[in-house]
Image: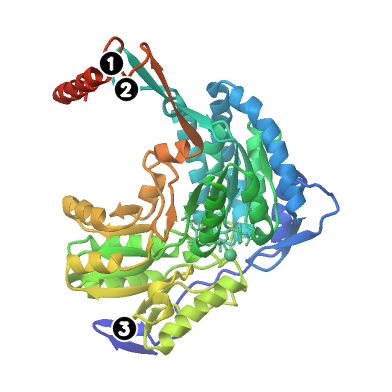
Amino acid sequence: MTASVGTMEMPRAGERAETTVKPVGAGLAGRVKPLIRGLSDMVALADRERKRTEVYAPFNRECIGAVPSCEAADVRVAVDRARAAQKAWAARPLRERTRVFMRYHDLVLDRLDSILDMLQVEGGKSRRHALEETLDVAINARYYAAHAAELLQPKRRQSLIPFILKAWEYHHPVGVVGIISPWNYPFTMAVSDAIPALIAGNAVVLKPADLTPFSALYGVRLLYEAGLPGDLLQVITGRGSVLGTPLIEQVDFIGFTGSTEVGRKIGEQAGRRLIKTSLELGGKNPMLVLDDADLERAVFVATQGSFAGAGQLCISYERMYVQSGIYDRFLEAFVARTKAQRLGSALDFSVDIGSLIGASQLEKTVEHVDDAQSKGAQVLAGGRSRPDIGPYFFEPTILTGVTEGMQCYREETFGPVVSIYKVDSVEEAITRANDSEFGLNAAVMCRDERKAVDVASRVRCGTVSVNETYQAPWSAMGAPMGGMKDSGLGRRHGIEGLLKYTESQNVSLSRISPLFPAPGLSVEASAAAYVAMLRLVKKIPGLR
Ligand code: NAP
Ligand code: MG
């Protein structure tokens, strides 16, 4: 049964989309058992008798293993060990430190299949999205290993009086860096922020998400295999609500990736201790499709960019502003492509989209779609959970007619749900894209590159891709990545992504003393001499 909207035939609200059913594979636990063996022994513990938390495969709810439920005493042990290991590490020549990460790069690529199995089984995502996350880890390791020397070496800096004063900028490790990471991209979010922290000479204490500890632990084990000295990266497993506060109370920097709600609390606690922090938080990412966009490309980017990780990627798109000239054609093609997405749990590249992580994420997704529908929105594709494929599958979903007052209008769904809005002008697209408390990521589709880049620079998001998905800015390692507004504080990648883990220091030397009053001059004469010097310096380009 179909209802017709515009030129298009589409399923009625709630009608099941033609999504391929790929049955859940049995024995997922068996597949990752050899990978998981011994991982929980790496967790820092003050007491071996800790309770354990089981970890379940989202594809079929099979228990794949258990990790200790750490307590505050374990955080103390982890931080103490890390602190003890940090000094010798920081004293090592930078070359030796970076060598570990060049080896890590190779090791991650060598173990690709195992890592992809692990990420799929523990996190429920499709293999192509697991691949994206794994390559990101390798890219981070290579980039920072290759660029650390140029970024960290002491640099001569401008001082007031040439030849008499000299200044250098130094960067020292902060000490012990705490990292709290989410479940959605559990390998890269745990390890990729640890890499620059370690290269800068710090130790790390990592608290991975409760739902996905093994992906993080596996990544840490590979770091030790690549030659990271013992104790330098400690892992504590368990609930963030239990471990967060003791961690923040003891570390010298806290890096957090997760929800805006928890990020605010972490920022407050870090503020009280006056430790540096970086917060990578939520988003409600817009995509702007302008009239002259390449239709096929726009549809490809929309599909790939909205449903990555079943929409549980912080930088995936949930709002689309489509200019009226291309709106009907775009919508028709996007709906068709979305319906053709293959959902499933196969541990190979045959499916496009995997599962949601668990019950609460599914509930939130269903709630957002139901709420929108009950208030008058139309479901043009998807809109249904798919228990026939697995307990937490939800079809990629396209909504129109979404208005203020519906939950998914402003709130992050963090599921495979995207709302499409027709706009009359480029200005309206920009204004509506910016009408959000979030500012994480955006995309602009427009053939005219100059215009596209201009529009992109006016969108208040930390990253914007032009004519490509989030993959373009995500993989641009030399440029910073992070959120504006409620999407965060601080950046990963690029110079900032490394130097944030350091204390910068200004070392300045003077060949005369005192500087003021100048030797042999009265205070009045010195004042006049300095004023004259400032006037002169301003006129000399090489000195100002
Ligand atoms: P979350 O609930 O904020 O959890 C993230 C991490 O914080 C987990 O390790 C969690 O531990 C821990 N945590 C929870 N409560 C805590 C507390 N009171 N103190 C200290 N730590 C605490 O976020 P999520 O649901 O896992 O992840 C989804 C969110 O992350 C989305 O909003 C998404 O947009 C965002 N995200 C942002 C980025 C980015 O780069 N900007 C990347 C990925 C995800 P438990 O596992 O024990 O709860
Ligand atoms: Mg959570």
User: Residue 174 got which mark?
Assistant: none
From the viewer's perspective, tell me whether residue 57 is left or right of residue 503. right
Disc 1 CB within 8 Å of nearest ligand 1 atom: no
Identify the amino acid type marked 3: Glu
Mark number displayed over residue 162: 1
Q: Residues within 10 Å of mark 3 (few under 14, many from 20)?
A: some
Image location (x, y in percent) of residue 184: 55, 59
| Residue on which the image places disc 3 | 9
**Residue 355 vs residue 12: left or right?**
right
Label 1 neighbourhood size at 10 Å, few (<14), some (14-19), many (20+)? few
Residue for point 73% across, 53% down: 72
Cα distance between the residues tagged 1 and 2: 7 Å
> The C terminus is located in which quarter?
top left
Drawn side of residue 110 relative to residue 326, left or right: right
Q: Is residue 516 above or below residue 244?
A: above
Foreground mark, 1 or 3, reads: 1
Q: Residues within 10 Å of mark 2 (few under 14, many from 20)?
A: some
Query: In terms of sequence position, does the residue under pointer 3 or pointer 2 come before the other?
Result: 3
